[in-house]
Image: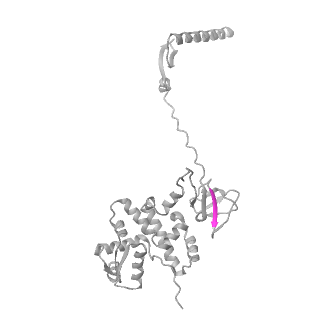
Amino acid sequence: MARAQSPGYPNASLPKAIQSARAIFEADRRNPIAREVAAKHIGYSGTSGAADKALATLAHYGLTEKVAKGEIKISQLALDIIHPDQPEDRKRALVQAAFSPQVFKDLRERFAGGHVSEGALESYLKRENFLDRAITPVTKAYLETCRFLEQEKAYESGGAGAEKAEESAPSEDGEESQTVFGGARVGDLIQWENGGVLQLERPARVRLVTDDGQWVCVENSETGIPMTEVTVLERAPAAPPPPPPRFAMPERERETALDAGETEWMRNRLGSETKVRLMVSGEMGPKEIGKLIKLLKAQQAVLTDDDEDEE
């Protein structure tokens, strides 16, 4: 009987593969070399099962190219990572290499953003007919690769993080698509999918997110929902920004402060403890002065009546 095999997969994470590719490049640049020589460059005594797996991992990431039977060389993609012309070139190359393995490309499409638990990965890989002995190295390599891309800020130039941005990008008609996977916040409208089956009769609003970000709860339910199984259909409306703070001015500054468009037209002392300032907005001519005199006389009459009533 033929021995059961898992689909092809890299046996190590991208940063480890880059380290091996760098060792080969430093020894032989991009010259075609025998696989046995390449194996020695990365620490093996020669060809063996372990060496073959290590070299196959480089090929999965696109860091080496097959030249002829038994010969390989470092790829241009590896060179763009090891010695890029620009920092952005390296980031793009990292994303391309990270998702060159077909299994990682599939995981990226299934779990957008690279934020997924080991349990969810293992469950998915079992359904995809991976053998038990392959599930742990695939899971470890994928999670380490995603963390590496985050550390290198490579998601800004493409990859799973970019896919999330694309999902939230404005469409042609100006509407913004809000569908993302994971990363739910309080107030978001979500759906819960487990094993390919929707678990909520209708989308619901998130009422709680645990401090570790691993679980959410929705309105009218006490059931914890794994963040990795959440699809955000609509983001909660952004809260309006708080009004700018107000800082009290010293009394003297408040006395002299002017509103926009105002000018101080007159300032006089009317007695030992009485002062008057006349603030004007607009023109102040004879007509306006006449009206002001009438207002002052009217106010004088009112105050006079008040004094007489008190007597």
Q: Position of residue 4 (x, y in %)?
A: 53, 85
Q: Main secondary structure of the magenta part?
A: strand
User: Which image quarter is the C terminus in?
Assistant: top right
Q: Residue at x 35, y 66 (%)?
A: 80
Taking the view exactly as shown, the residue that stands out farthest to the bottom is: 1
Q: Residue at x 40, y 76 (%)?
A: 59
**Is 234 in front, or is 45?**
234
Q: How many marks?
A: 0
Q: Residue at x 47, y 20 (%)?
A: 263
Q: Is residue 123 magenta?
A: no
Q: Position of residue 191 (x, y in %)?
A: 64, 61
65 relative position to 180: left or right: left
Q: Position of residue 170 (x, y in %)?
A: 53, 52
Q: Is residue 190 magenta?
A: yes
Looking at the image, residue 37 lies above or below residue 89: below
106 relative position to 65: left or right: right
Q: Which residues are magenta?
A: 189-193
User: Which image quarter is the N terminus in?
Assistant: bottom right
Looking at the image, residue 220 lies above or below residue 195: above
Rendered image quadrant of residue 150 = bottom left
Q: Position of residue 72 (x, y in %)?
A: 34, 78
Q: How is the image coloured?
A: one colour
